[in-house]
Image: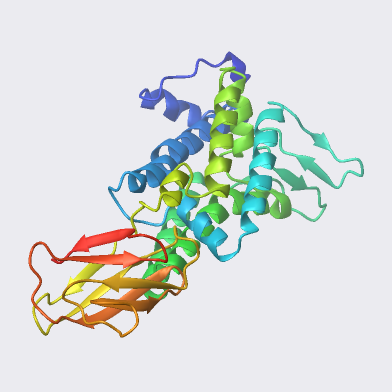
Amino acid sequence: MASSAVTWPWPWQLRKWWDLLHSPDEEVCREAWGYVFWIPVILLLFLPAELVPAFGAANWPTFSTTIGHLEYLFGPTALLVVALMVFTAFNALARRRRETGLSADGSYRLDAHGGRIVWRNAKQPARESVPMWAYLLGSAVVIAGLATIAFVFGGYWPGAYVLWSLVAFFVVVLPSILAFFFAKHVQFPTLFRTVANLRSHVDMVATAVLAFLVVLAVHLSLYPWPNVAHVVQVDHQIAPSVSGSAVKGGTVTVSGTVENCARPAKVVVRSRVFPEDGSSGVGATTVNVHGGHYSLKIKLLATPTSKDTVSVFCGRPEVGETHFK
């Protein structure tokens, strides 16, 4: 039965989705897995991971923050981001719903239902499916385990790179490797194939996908756009944190990130109850920035009051401030 003849259920009709995921018709089964996999990934994982920190409700390394940090370290990364977004947009919108066939020399073919290239090697075994639940569970365990190790032993940015690299590997790279070299497929098709399938049912999807990819390309290549105006006006927050014994003679630690500043090598940390380092002014100390992070341990000259604050500067007017705990 062609998937076009299927009555596709609403998202909350779980029983019908279960039946489609276990349909004997491979075309219907693979299309259903595309929706069940990619729509939650985008709506329940990717977008919340991006939007929640943007509203200040959390502080974890989002995909865009990680890309922005990579651009901070190596500016030409933005060119690669734009090229990748153009490639993604073209394939997502130009890909036909059903296309298959061999290459001119017969060395490979395109999987009609999955959208991945399969190398036609005579020594390969018959095409098999990778158990979906095992793939999802195994991927989640490996991503969670290795990312946790990276965060604990490597720190914020190493953990961010490991986390998002693993997500990209298991969602995009590994399924293509399994298809091309081993003639095995995971049951969810590529994002391009899923978009093509969805477009065959809802024409407006093409416009929505293009708009999303354009916004994403601008956001990633000009990170932290749309907050660029805030960076120019220097009113964005470095948001330093203070920990330790906030009493006279006690030692506190002031730390934070400055990835949104203009590549500062140093920041100045200042408070009325801090000693001065001889060059930065009263109550001010200069701190070196390493990998977008700064950290300073300092002994207090007096016990801070509820009105005392800790301010951070990065060669501009004041851009970060917090109170003692």
> How many numbered circles does the render carry?
0
Which x, y percent locates residue 189? 60, 38
Q: With respect to residue 153, does 76 lie above or below?
A: above
Which x, y percent locates residue 311? 26, 65
Which x, y percent locates residue 12? 35, 24
Q: With respect to residue 265, does 160 lie above or below?
A: above
User: What colour scheme was applied to this rendering of the protein?
Assistant: rainbow
Q: With respect to residue 35, does 169 lie above or below?
A: below
Q: Which picture quadrant has residue 218?
A: top right
In the rendered view of the protein, which quadrant contains the N terminus?
top right
The answer to whether any part of residue 178 appears in the image is no
Please tell me which residue lies in front, 53 or 14: 53
Q: Seen in the image, is 231 located left or right of residue 67?
A: left
Residue at coordinates 60% horizontally, 22% vertically from top-left? 199
Residue extending farthest to the right is 105
Please tell me which residue lies in front, 210 or 125: 210
Which x, y percent locates residue 282? 24, 77
Please tell me which residue lies in front, 178 or 207: 207
Residue at coordinates 61% horizontally, 16% vertically from top-left? 4
Residue at coordinates 61% horizontally, 26% vertically from top-left? 197
The answer to whether any part of residue 269 appears in the image is yes
In the rendered view of the protein, which quadrant contains the C terminus?
bottom left
Please tell me which residue lies in front, 120 or 94: 94
Residue at coordinates 69% horizontally, 35% vertically from top-left? 91
